[in-house]
Image (cartoon, helix red, strand yellow):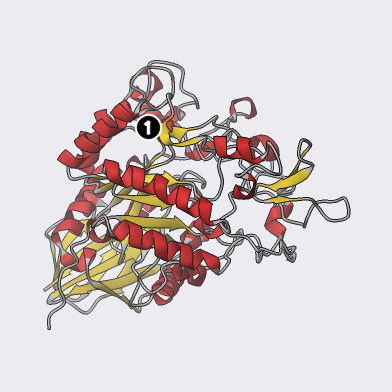
Amino acid sequence: MSKPIIKSWWKHGVMYQIYPRSFKDSNNDGIGDLEGIIQSLDYLQDVGVDGIWLSPIYRSPMYDFGYDVSDYCSIDPIFGTIANFKKLLKEAEKRNIAIIMDMVLNHTSHLHPWFVESRSSVDNPKRDWYIWHPGKNGKVPNNWMAAFGGRAWTWDELTRHYYLHLFTEQQPDLNWHNPEVKKAMVDVLRYWLDMGVKGFRFDVINYIVKDINVRSNPYRLRLTYPRRHDLQVHIYDRNQPEIHDILKELRQLLDSYGDTMSVGETYPNEGEKEPAMAASYQGNNDELHLSFDFSTIYARFNAREFECILKNWYHAIGDSGWPCHVLSNHDQSRAITRLANNDVRKAKLLAVMLLTQKGTPFIYYGEEIGMVDGKIKRSQIQDPLGKKYWPFHKGRDKARTPMQWDVTPNAGFSNGKPWLPVNSDYVTTNVLQQQRNKQSILHLYKDCIAIRRLHPALYAGDIEFVSAPDDVLLYKRVFKNEHLMIALNFSKAKKDVTIGVKGEVLLSSCGNSSMHSSHSSIHGGTLTLDAYEAVIIKVQ
C-alpha cells in the first residue's frame, strides 16, 4: 500500500511566530497591536505562512510582557479588543492562515483574581490553587531558584506562608495537583477554541507539575553567568510524571475540535541538549502534537554538529511522533547573529536547512528579512531578566526589536516612539527593499516555501542523511517516487560534492551568482558549492 500524503495543515505547513508588541503598531502608541497584524496578513500570505503563533495578548500588568496573565479570557487593551481578535481570526481564515495562541499554564499574574483570593486567607477556597508552604525551620521550603533571579519562594506576610514562583515574584505558580485548576484551565482553552483558534503553544509545559514533596534539586558544575538557577539539575521543579496524564486529557480536548494542534515549550536544563525529554511529551501520539527541541539553539554553525543534532532529534521522535524545528524565538538571540555572525549568506543556508527538514518549521518574525539582534543600551532595557543581570546577561530585548517594514522613520513600525529602539540597519534591511530585490533573503524564504508546498517529499517525505565532505551537510527527502537532495556548504571555501545522481536544481541560496541557478541541470553526479551555498535538487 502506498504511503498517503499527510493532510494536517500543522504537519505540512509553515508556522510564523509574531511577538505582537513588536510587529506592527496601528494606533501610534509605540506598541504593536492586533489591527497592525491584520494589516500585515497579505504580506504573511505572500510569504507562504500557514499558521501564526501569537505571543500572549491576554490582559496583563506586563511585568513579563504578557507571560503574567491576569485574565485569560480577555485581550489586553494595548493590543485591542475581543472584536479585534475575532476580526483577525476571520481575516486570517480568508487567507487560509490558522491562528495559534500562546497559553501560559504554569503560572498567572499575582494580580489575577485567583491569586488575589488565594493569598487573602489560608481558608480561602482558592488557597490550594497555588503552591503555598509554611517553610522549614524558619527558612524557605527548599533550594529551588527562580529563572529571573533569586529564590523561587516569596514570603507572604498576611498569611505567613511562602508561595512558589519559578519566574518573577509577580508570576505565582499554579498547583496542578489540584483538579479544580485543571478544570479552570480546560475551560479557558475551550473558550478560545470555540472562538475559532486552531491550537496553542504551551509555555514551559514541562514545568506545570512540581514534586509534591518539594525536594531540593541537586547542583552541577557549569560555567555560567551568576544565576544559581542554571547550576541546578532540575529534577524536582519540572518534568514530573503527572504532566503526561494532563497532556493526554488536553490532547483529547484539542482533537475533539478537529484539525487543531498543540506545540510545547519543553525547556531543558540550561545549555543542555535534551531531545529525548522533548520527544517524551508527545507520548504515543497522544499528548502534544509537537514539542520544541532546543538543541539547535545551542548549536554552532557546523555541518557535522547540525547533522548530529538532527539525527538525534529524529531518533528521539521515532515513528509515532512528528518533529518540528526552530532556530530563533523571543527568548533567544536571533539565529543570524548567534549562528551566522550577521552574515546573510549563512542565514540563507540556515533558512534552506530549516525549510527542508522533515517536520514543521517555525519562523520567528523578521527572520525572513535577516533581522539581526538589536543593540540595546542599559537605559533602554525593558526585559526583567536584563534588568536583573546586566551586563552578564543583557536580556532578551535584542531579539524583540520592532519589525522593519520600510525606510520611513521607525522602519514603518509606528509613527510614535517604539517601545524598543528600531535596529539602525532598517534602511537596508526591511520588507519593502527586499520585496524589490529578487536576490534578497526574503525572496529566498518565499521561493523555498513555495518549493516545499509543491513537493510532497519536502512536507511529507522521509529523510536520509548522506555521507559528505567536512563542512557539507547532505541529505535526501523521499516520498513515493519523488527524490530530492539538499546540499549545504557550511564553509567559506568552495566545496566539490559527489552526489551520484542526475538532477535539476530547484533553488540555490546564491541565486544568479551561482553556477547552480534555478532549473540548471546536474549531469555528472558532482557539483561545486560556492561558499555558504545551499542547493535543492530534484533527482531525475
Answer with left or right where residue 417 lies relative to residue 378: left
Q: Is residue 198 above or below residue 5?
A: above
Answer with left or right where residue 205 lies relative to residue 27: right
| x, y percent for residue 1 | 12, 83
Answer with left or right where residue 21 lies relative to residue 91: right
Crowdedness near tag 1: few (<14), some (14–19) or many (≥20) residues, C-alpha within 10 Å? many
Residue 354 seen in the current view: no
| Residue nearer the viewer, 405 or 522 | 405
| x, y percent for residue 17 | 37, 44
Q: Quadrant of residue 451?
A: bottom left
Q: Quadrant of residue 91?
A: top left
Q: Which residue is mark 1?
A: 23
Q: Residue at x 48, y 67 (%)?
A: 244
Q: Residue at x 61, y 39 (%)?
A: 115
Q: Residue at x 63, y 50 (%)?
A: 128
Q: Residue at x 57, y 56 (%)?
A: 178
Residue 534 seen in the current view: yes
Circle 1 SS class = loop
